[in-house]
Amino acid sequence: MRLAQFIVANTEPILAAWEEFARTILPAAKMDSLALRDHAGDLLLATVRDMESVQTEAQRWDKATEYGDGSPQSIRLNGASEEHALGRLGSGFDLLQLVSEYRALRASVLSLWRKSLPAADHRDVDDANLFHESIDQSLAKAVISYTKRIDESRDMFLAILSHDLRNPLNAIAMSAEMLPQACKLDSESTGFATRISGSAQIMAGMISDLLDYTRTRLGAGMPVEPAPMDLGVLCTEVGDEFRSANPALRLQFDSMGDLSGEWDPARLRQVVSNLLGNAIQHGDPNAPIELRLRGDPSGVMLAIRNRGTPIPQGELQKIFDPLVRGAAAQMPRQNRPGSIGLGLYIAHELVLAHGGRINVTSSAEEGTVFTIRLPRHTPRRAPETRPGASLSDA
């Protein structure tokens, strides 16, 4: 009996073995038989249909590299895999336990088939390969579906949390500011109120970063309100603010050409502040930081250079990724005060929202340079929101 035929004829013993293994996993201890089997039967039958379908070498290659070749059989297999993964997530299985189930399924099918002592067939090797390919496709789709739902849940949680934190934080900040005016406080109590107000402002900035992060992750995009402005004036103001806060800072500012355009002043201030803060955090404190602006007919270029330890090439590929820290020993792991590690990601998204682009280069000879190119006018486009996700009241 060929493998696909064996699976159809022995679905119940295979499911029983799968259920027996699932019961050894902690979340399954209190689940009944129906819940444990979940979509396992559909998954097995979809695997059989996929194995029995006529597949060219190109289709098998597509399955191996893209988790399906687009055929009805592959679509059914992916659907059953996704339903099983989401069902297990809802039952409290972690990703390792989900993967372990597939390992147990693979082992159970092949072990039971071998014990049945099937008559030798020259197609047995091909059948086994088709089975492994189908299980691998199913596992890959299950992992993708599981992690995608986890990411969506996390992002929605962060959106709700950061939104709901704003009201009590605003109350704290307003109370701290009003307290010295409403009461006759001694110098020590006034200092306490000032520190509370300062800490509230820092927390407000962190919550704002979280809201920006979740807007992009949930498909809402970064909101920008373009208006006529001069980027040279804005950079001068931001530079003066950083010099006041960092008296030892050596900031070299150089500008040339027409630096006017239609951009969001508050958002570009955020971009420049994030990049300057990053340069101060990672740069050589004994070397100057350079801020250069150039205007030409096509737009404006902004570059910020520091002379710190070069960023490893492997880290450059993911430097704008959210909530990712450099793994190399040369990369500092702590964030600067008031930061939650989203500064570069937010800067990247804000530049894109203005229709621009941002890149980074890093070497011992040239230092680390973040370069931004902005068109003169921010393109108007409506943000795309994923169905079921809304930050309209955030």
Image (cartoon, rainbow, N blue to C red):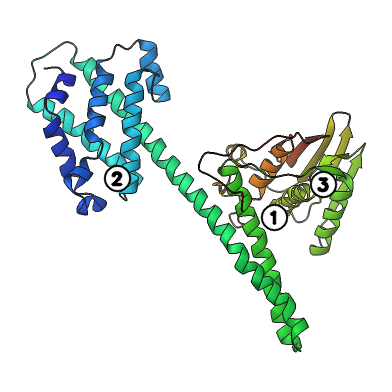
Amino acid at circle 1:
Gln
Name the side, left or right, on which 85 lies relative to 359: left
For this orientation, the residue located farthest to the right is 257
Residue 249: quadrant of the picture:
bottom right
Q: Nearer the viewer, residue 128 or 94?
A: 94
Closer to viewer: mark 2 or mark 3: 2
Ranked by sequence position, the earlier of labels 2 and 3 is: 2
Question: What kind of element bears circle 2?
Answer: helix
Q: Position of residue 288 (x, y in %)?
A: 81, 51
What number is the disc on residue 97? 2
Amino acid at circle 2:
Gln
Distance CA(mark 1)–CA(mark 2): 40 Å
In this figure, which residue is indicated by the disc labeled 3?
290
What number is the disc on residue 281? 1
Give me the residue at 65% from left, 71% from top: 171
Amino acid at circle 3:
Glu
Give me the residue at 74% from left, 51% from top: 270
Distance CA(mark 2)–CA(mark 3): 51 Å
Ranked by sequence position, the earlier of labels 1 and 3 is: 1
Q: Residues within 10 Å of mark 1 (few under 14, many from 20)?
A: some
Name the side, left or right, on which 140 lies relative to 260: left
Q: Residues within 10 Å of mark 3 (few under 14, many from 20)?
A: some
Question: What kind of element bears circle 3?
Answer: strand
Question: What kind of element bears circle 1?
Answer: helix
Residue 259 in view of the camera: yes
